[in-house]
Amino acid sequence: MNFNKGIFYFLFAILVIGSMVIYFKVQRDMKLENPSLTDLATEPDLLMNTADRTLQDHKSLTAIGFLEDAIKMMKLLEKDGDSISTEAIEVAIGDLEIVEDHIKAEDINDDLMYEAFADAMNSLAFASLRVSEQFIREGKKEEARVTINYAMDHLQNSIKFARGQQKEDEIRIASHLQKLIDEHLESDISQIDLVMSEIDSVVKAHVIK
């Protein structure tokens, strides 16, 4: 009897574990299908933050690994966009590759790295807003709202790294986008275009070379 009971519990445990594995795989696949609509959208920001912390701890190889993961995630996000949003993400990737090269050459400094990180996050915000416009045109208001909120997350994350005039510009842009959200103008493409134009100006003013 005890033997049969043990078999039952063993099979039950296998069933539960198997169900959990399948569930998390399905959830992950759903995220990968539309990364711009999930928390994967801000994964590059988190990886940049982690790269910064590890670099401050003098762990350059680890920091490079986090930057490479951020670049991989950005390439995944490109799937959800058009040529314009893809171009914005390519700018972000270019910024991180420059930072990576400087770390490898051991001539990195906080000013260059933080400007690059802020620029990359601004580019991701631009791409998110571009994707939101696609959703608006398709009548998918909830999806548009989600991507706009992720754009705001990118802007707020970039403010943590920006300095001087770049920081002031980004605070102004974030305030503009927040006003659109507060006034329920998220479906107004002309207003979103204005915010995208402001972001584009800041990105171009801080091109990393």
Image (cartoon, helix red, strand yellow):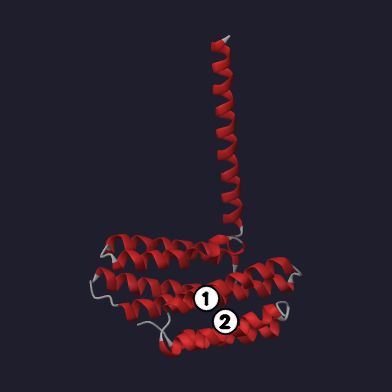
Image quadrant holding the N terminus, namely: top right
Q: CA distance from mark 2 to mark 1?
A: 7 Å
Q: Where 169 sits versus 41, above or below?
A: below
Tell me whether the residue at label 2 lies in contact with that at label 1, contact meaning CB atoms closer than 8 angstroms: yes
Q: In which quadrant of the rendered image does the C terminus lie?
A: bottom left
Residue 120 point in image, percent of width and height: 45, 75
Q: Which mark is residue 22?
A: none
Identify the image quadrant of residue 84.
bottom right
Residue 163 occupies which quadrant of the picture?
bottom left
Residue 32 is situated, as x and y percent measured from the top left of the image, at 57, 55
**Dot 2: element:** helix
In this view, the residue farthest toward the front is: 2
Q: Would residue 62 appear left or right of 34 to someone viewing this image?
A: left
Q: Quadrant location of residue 92?
A: bottom left
Relative height, residue 90 to residue 17 (above, below): below
The residue nearer to you, when weighing 9 against 121, is 9
Q: Residues within 10 Å of mark 1 (few under 14, many from 20)?
A: many
Reading the image, the residue beneath label 1 is 156
Residue 125 % position (x, y): 55, 75
Q: Which residue is rendered at x = 68% and y = 70% of the image?
A: 145
* Residue 83 at least partly seen: no
Query: Which residue is labeled 2 in the image?
Result: 174
Q: Residue at x 30, y 71 (%)?
A: 101
Q: Is residue 90 above or below residue 47?
A: below
Mark 2 is surrounded, within 10 Å at the Cα level, by few (under 14), some (14 to 19) or many (20 or more) other residues, namely many
Q: Residue at x 32, y 69 (%)?
A: 100
Residue 105 visible (yes or no): yes
Q: Amino acid at mark 2?
A: Ala
Amino acid carrying label 1: it is: Gln
Residue pushed farthest top?
1
Q: Residue furthest right?
A: 139
